[in-house]
Image (cartoon, helix red, strand yellow):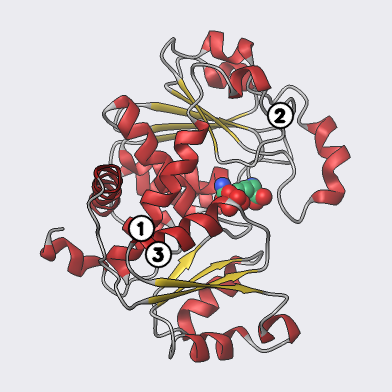
Amino acid sequence: MKTLAKERFQGKDFLSLQDFTQDELLYLIEVGRTLKEERRAGIPHPHLQGKTLGMIFTKSSTRTRVSFEVGMFQLGGHALFLSNRDIQLGRGETVADTARTLSRMVDGIMIRTYSHEEVLELAAYSSAPVINGLTDLHHPCQVLGDLMTIQEHKGRLAGLKLTYIGDGNNMAHSLLYAAKMGMQVVIASPSGYKPKAEVVASARTDAAAYGGAITIMDDPLAAAAEADVLYTDVWASMGQEEETEKRRRDFAGYQINRETLKIARRDCIVLHCLPAHREEEITAEVMDGPHSLVFEEAENRLHIEKAIMALIM
Ligand code: CP
Ligand code: NVA
């Protein structure tokens, strides 16, 4: 790894893609790809020997937990799984006191929770870097891994059209920042489920400096026209389980299926952060079909989390 570039990341939090320049994101992806190649070639890379990551979870996880825990092990360090149910945070100890305590013992903290403000507060009081492993507002680790997947398969990011069909949720918000890679990001959501206006505005400002563009629209089929990348996510996110039935009705038609594929570019790739609800936001046929890269995308979480940790810790 280049020492000079490394210094730009040392000790920095990883909370939103907004906090990183295009150059820094490209560098993180490059490091992720190197770590992936080294892993495949059996070359050990113990960049975090003797270091420890605390992982706070107040929501479920498969990919995020396993990628950080396995990633830390492969980097020569150790990860602690701290469920909200088991630590004092769940019994009312403050976020600030938790941050002050944990950061005296660990070298980095990863947190997955509901409120984004809680993560900002944790970062403000932690002397160790904090990584956002998903909040209701953002999922930056996922999108960085997705950009790595797109770059691997398309050979570039700039100039590509990425269409996201579905809820204007945490995934949509973080994907909006992909526009700063010089991409055209189109979001198609039903009314009442559009991404937050302030996130759209900030991502637009960010993108303008890099020749990217953002379009928010209603019609999923019009949005899919000539797309290089089709992306979707569940209609009801974690914490919205009670709205499942209403959302099934409101999102009818916002599905990636064979009709969507016909409108996109012939060589388009299909991504989904997972977990998926097959036959709701995506058909099983498309998810298991030749355009889908969803499991490669899931694997890339491992390589990109390692890049994030190796650089900031
Ligand atoms: N995509 C993602 O973050 O998956 P998990 O919820 O399983 O961590
Ligand atoms: N929007 C989904 C993403 C899961 C990775 C959720 O928040 O549940």
Q: Residue at x 61, y 44 (%)?
A: 195
- Amino acid type of the residue tagged 3 in the rendering: Phe
Name which of mark 1 and mark 3 comes first in the sequence: 3
Distance CA(mark 1)–CA(mark 3): 10 Å
Q: Give the left or right position of residue 287, taking residue 106 as reference.
A: right
| Mark 3 CB lies closer than 8 A to ligand 1 | no
- Marker disc for residue 278: 2
Q: Quadrant of residue 77?
A: bottom left
Label 2: few (<14), some or many (≥20) within 10 Å? some
Residue 60 position within the rendered picture, expressed as x and y whole percent measured from the top left: 67, 58
Residue 170 shows in this picture: no
Residue 15 position within the rendered picture, expressed as x and y whole percent measured from the top left: 45, 64
Q: Residue at x 48, y 48 (%)?
A: 142
Front-lying residue, 242 or 73: 73
Name which of mark 2 and mark 3 comes first in the sequence: 3
- Marker disc for residue 73: 3
| 229, above or below 66, in the image | above
